[in-house]
Image (tube, rainbow, N blue to C red):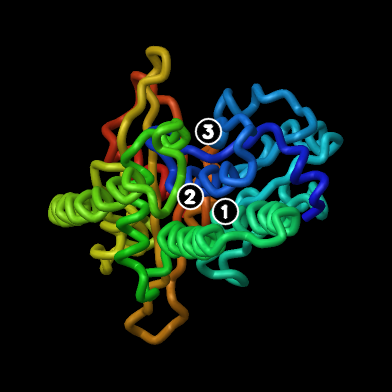
Amino acid sequence: MDIVALRGIKHIVAHKDPKQPCADGTASAIIAHRVLPDAKIQFVAYQSPELEAIEPAPGYLFVDIVPPKSRALQWVEHHPIVLDHHLQAEDVVAMFGENGVYADLNEMPGVSAALLTFIHVYLPLREERDKRIKNPSTLAMDNTARLGKFAELVGVRDTWQMNDSRWEEASEIAAALVFFPQYSWFKEDYEFAFDGPKWHDRMAMGKDLWQAHKTKVFHLFQVAHRMQLDCGLIAAVVPSSDTSDVANLLTDAHIVVGFDFLDRNGIVFMRLSMRSRPIIQPDGESPVDIDVSSIAAKMGGGGHRNAAGCTFPLTSDTPNPYATILSILNQFL
């Protein structure tokens, strides 16, 4: 990445989910903030008015999110740095040439925006600063190593590397990142430091939060409603948008869909969170592997092949949530 472009970053735009912080977006901003302490940080969601409203200008870094496709050509003229790994972002990232880096899940499993930010933003700026210092301290080098491990663990959880031996540790970190408000990580008294007591306090809470989350997941597993689709596949529906972990327990379902509701200025929206994974067929045929990102895209959302979501407004004619989900799945599968 061009060091002059990195030095010129004045704004960091990072991803957030519509209803809660995004662990990967938060981590990416934390990492970038370490070498760009004066850059203004803004968290925005995909397909949000806030993202569309950002005026194209020089000095921008996008992490775990990309400029809106509708204004991408305007953004290209200002040469922002764009780092992302979401499936729907690949073509937009490519528009920015050398200033865009995309992590393909199949080619780079476990790499999320946090690790992209560490490699392409933090390390170049840190190395440049260390050259000026000539004799960087052991503590500084240790913190860089810890930051790299932190970025890797965030990627383990965010890209769903469940077979990784660090899965539990990664999940604990993610639980802490999601629990606290995103902007709170940048208050002066919470300045990021791996050896700082307040940082360790939050990470310790992550362990408890993760255990509580697993209890909630087991309850969702118990109340999941299964339905057979017109195509013969089995869907499981749970009353929560937090479907990532419960999907791993619902091993008989080809697709797991969670739902909840959002109120935006008096308009009620339904939010769907979809998960899938390859399921081996008993007759020995090729595994069934549903691309939920294609379903989400048709509903105005996006995500990854096996993890995606969308949000849409409800009307007085909208049936109950289970009937709505059944209709959507039958329409697109």
| 244 and 177: which is toward the camera | 177
Residue 113 marker: 1
Crowding at label 2, few (<14), some or many (≥20) Cα neighbours within 10 Å?
many
User: Is residue 328 left or right of 54 when viewed as pictured?
Assistant: left
Helix, strand, or loop for circle 2?
Answer: helix
Which badge, 1 or 2, is on the more N-terminal residue?
2
User: Is residue 207 left or right of 109 when viewed as pictured?
Assistant: left
Q: Position of residue 269 (x, y in %)?
A: 39, 26
Picture residue at 61% right of the left edge, 49% below the top: 88
User: Is residue 176 left or right of 65 when viewed as pictured?
Assistant: left
Crowding at label 3, few (<14), some or many (≥20) Cα neighbours within 10 Å?
many
Amino acid type, label 2: Asp
| 295 and 195: which is toward the camera | 195
Q: CA distance from mark 1 to mark 2?
A: 6 Å
> Which residue is labeled 3 in the image?
43
Residue situated furthest bottom in the rendering: 284
Asked if the residue under mark 3 is in contact with the one under mark 2, i.e. CB atoms within 8 Å, the reply is: no
Picture residue at 30% right of the left edge, 46% below the top: 202
Q: CA distance from mark 2 to mark 3?
A: 12 Å
Helix, strand, or loop for circle 3?
Answer: strand
Identify the image quadrant of the N terminus: bottom right
Picture residue at 47% right of the left edge, 62% below the top: 146
Residue situated furthest top in the rendering: 266
User: Is residue 293 left or right of 204 when viewed as pictured?
Assistant: right
Asked if the residue under mark 2 is in contact with the one under mark 1, i.e. CB atoms within 8 Å, the reply is: yes
Q: CA distance from mark 3 to mark 1?
A: 14 Å
